[in-house]
Image (cartoon, rainbow, N blue to C red):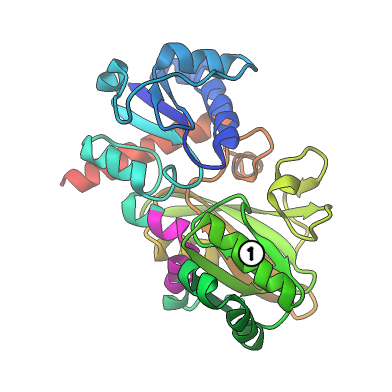
Amino acid sequence: MRIGLVFGGRSGEHEVSIQSAKSIYKVLGTQANRQRYEVIPFYIQRNGFWLGPSVARTLLESADQIIEQEGSLWQFPVEVESVELWLPALHGPNGEDGTIQGLFSLMHLPYVGSGVLGSALGMDKIAMKAAFNQVGLPQVKYTSSTRGEIIKESHQLAQSIAEEIGFPCFVKPANLGSSVGVSKAENLAQLSKALEVASLFDRRVIIESAISNPRELECAILGNETALASVVGEITYSGDSGFYDYETKYTDGRSQIHIPADIPVHIVQKIQDMSIQAFRSVDAAGLSRVDFFYLESTDELFINEINTLPGFTSFSMYPQLWGTSGVDFSELIHQLIQLALERYQQELK
């Protein structure tokens, strides 16, 4: 089967996408997968132009970056016609928000991961939280705003949010991943600035109450209608920002992964159950990583978010969680491809 591995993209997570694709490309080249699949890689430049396998392979097999080439948007390389199943290693807008999933659907081809709805809900933090509320998953207090409101009445809006949410709080763009554009606010001045920063990245902004010293726990999901939950892992980190920001996340030595997390058995079970519930609430498919805050002092859990297309870099949590759960990286990619085929065949009925 010819697998179209697509990576790069126009989002701020372009570099992370390349690293995820390199890891996936490597495991698809293992002996077992080589007998099952032929990989045809495609690189989407930052300007949105698609480059074919000859350039994409060079980027995946070397440490060098490709100098952007000229082309036409949506002028696909001829090799696209031979793809039988798509495997997106894309993160952020145009990669995991339902847009490229819509393109694959229009091609009438199976693809790894959630469909248009699941991807869009999983990407948009405001819609995601509404879906979580619908099934009763516990969350921190939050509210939302828009770029127009922030431009028009920044100071008055900050005061209103402070009264509703309190300090400290986090301000985030609604539709970005990897902590891009996220700020922590401790007072009105910081909140006003945080709202302005977040609105530069997205038209819609979400503001969340901050929990004091929570443990940050994560669980991986694998499956479609029948979904399995992995062991639970924990992220610990150090950094100047005081939270798990982009720099901390992708700088060696700034964060540590602990798998399995040293937490009570009943909390593990609760996280696994809630992760599957969250997965179903947004109509996700194939894979997801679900993140939680755990307050030891009160034994409380709060769901933070679901990531329907998590990273596959060498230090990403998702493949490591499944590795500890007994599914190695090579087998994990194989299972994800098979789940994509299963879902596609069900939708044809």
Q: Position of residue 272 (x, y in %)?
A: 57, 61
Question: Is residue 270 in view from this perspective?
Answer: no
Q: Position of residue 187 (x, y in %)?
A: 76, 77
| Residue sitting at the far left | 349
Give the magenta part as a residue range.
120-131
For the N terminus, give its image quadrant.
top left
Report the residue marked by disc 1: 292
Q: Residue drawn 51% across and 75% down?
A: 152
Q: Position of residue 144 (x, y in %)?
A: 51, 74
Q: Position of residue 203 (x, y in %)?
A: 46, 62
User: Residue 292 vs residue 37: left or right?
Assistant: right
User: Residue 61 vs residue 188: left or right?
Assistant: left
**Front-most of residues 73 and 316:** 73
Disc 1 is placed on an element classified as strand
Residue 229 belongs to magenta span? no
Question: Is residue 186 in view from this perspective?
Answer: yes
Residue 123 belongs to magenta span? yes
Q: Residues within 10 Å of mark 1 (few under 14, many from 20)?
A: many
Q: Residue drawn 47% across and 35% down?
A: 9
User: Which quadrant of the figure has residue 173?
Assistant: bottom right
**Front-most of residues 26 and 262:** 26
**Front-most of residues 81 and 277:** 81
Q: Main secondary structure of the magenta part?
A: helix
Residue type at numbered disc 1: Phe
Residue 197 in the image: above or below residue 327:
below
**Front-most of residues 76 and 159:** 159
Q: Residue drawn 69% across and 37% down?
A: 315
